[in-house]
Amino acid sequence: MKDFLEISAIGSEGLEAILDFATADLPPVLAGKGVALVFEKPSLRTRSSSEMAAVALGAHPVYITDAEVGIDKRESAEDIAKVLAGYHSAIAARVFDHRVLERMAKALNDSRAGVPVINLLSDRSHPCQAIADLITVKEHFGSVRGVEMAYVGDSNNVALSLAEAAALAGASVRIASPEGYGFDAATRQRLAALGEVAFGTDPVEAVKGARVIYTDTWTSMGQEAEAAERRAAFGPRFQVNSALMAQAAGDAIFMHCLPAHRGEEVTGEVMDSAASVIYRQAANRMPAFKSVLYWTVAG
Ligand code: CP
Ligand code: NVA
């Protein structure tokens, strides 16, 4: 049993194993078991892909909203985790505060519950998304190793997991964020120690010659009050449009974890272009979660 909270925590061996599982015919190791899917925030892709992946491994997924459980309001995150462990073989959760996931994992580890905790997105990271991203890059280019990637936009949860995954898998990533929206010095140092990750504030510099151009929303869930301020800080320079894509390699693909805001961080033209792999990427959330779930309970 292993938790899946951060890409950096599973290391390159864990990452390699999970990517291999994505193309394997996995046995239904969770037949007759439950998988709890707890959501403090909305979701289209993560909820559907995790439910279907749990079913594919033989499990019965139970979708639970925070309106019902009230994490740290109705009862503590620790008590919720320990109660859910009585019915489920894995607990996957999407939370505002990453520390809630760590507390759940610690409570289950301390009580030797033998039930893993899986991060379905927190304010810090989105590791299940990064697995789907690497599956997509591998599917498209045949390998992740050596692929030059550029991430243009907010240095957020998606960017962190992508950078960790790409670095561990031997790809390179150049991240361009506006001043004040980049990773802090400690995070930069940690990422640079994992592999080839570079940081800057110039989107054109970042995308030059890159084969993957990736962006995400300028305003993540929980930051809605900052939306106007963020639009002013990012737009129009950090928008991925046809002019920016033209600076990339001739065979570059466009990626976005979705949901996207057409006309803000990316134009509709780029989203719908031949270079765009966004719907493959979204579809790959299913094998990604199936592999992650398998790795946590049986890997
Ligand atoms: N990319 C992603 O996690 O989408 P949802 O928020 O819809 O799950
Ligand atoms: N960065 C976005 C990703 C959504 C899937 C958010 O946290 O809202």
Image (cartoon, rainbow, N blue to C red):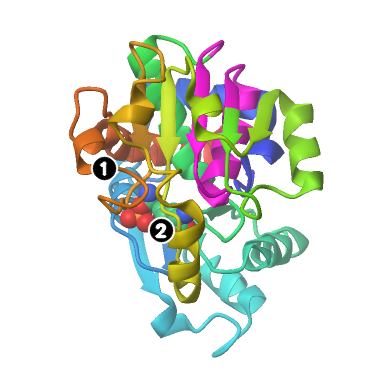
Q: Residue 15: x, y in percent?
A: 58, 28
- Give the magenta-colored segment's residue range: 145-173
Q: Picture quarter containing residue 25?
A: top left
Where is 213 relative to 264, above or below? Answer: above
| Residue 219 seen in the current view | no
Can you see residue 53?
yes
- In the rendered image, the vertical position of residue 217 relative to residue 224, given as above or below: above
SS under mark 1: loop
Task: Determine crowd level at label 2: few under 14, some 14-19, many 20+ residues with C-alpha closer than 10 A.
Answer: many
Q: Which residue is mark 2?
A: 34
165 drawn magenta: yes
Q: Quadrant of the N terminus?
A: top right
* Relative vertical location of residue 106 with respect to residue 288 in this rendering, above or below: below
Q: Which residue is mark 1?
A: 267
Q: Residue at image x 57%, y 76%?
A: 80
Q: Of residues 45 and 275, which is closer to you in this image? A: 275
Q: Name the image quarter holding the C terminus.
A: top right
C-alpha distance separating marks 2 and 1: 41 Å
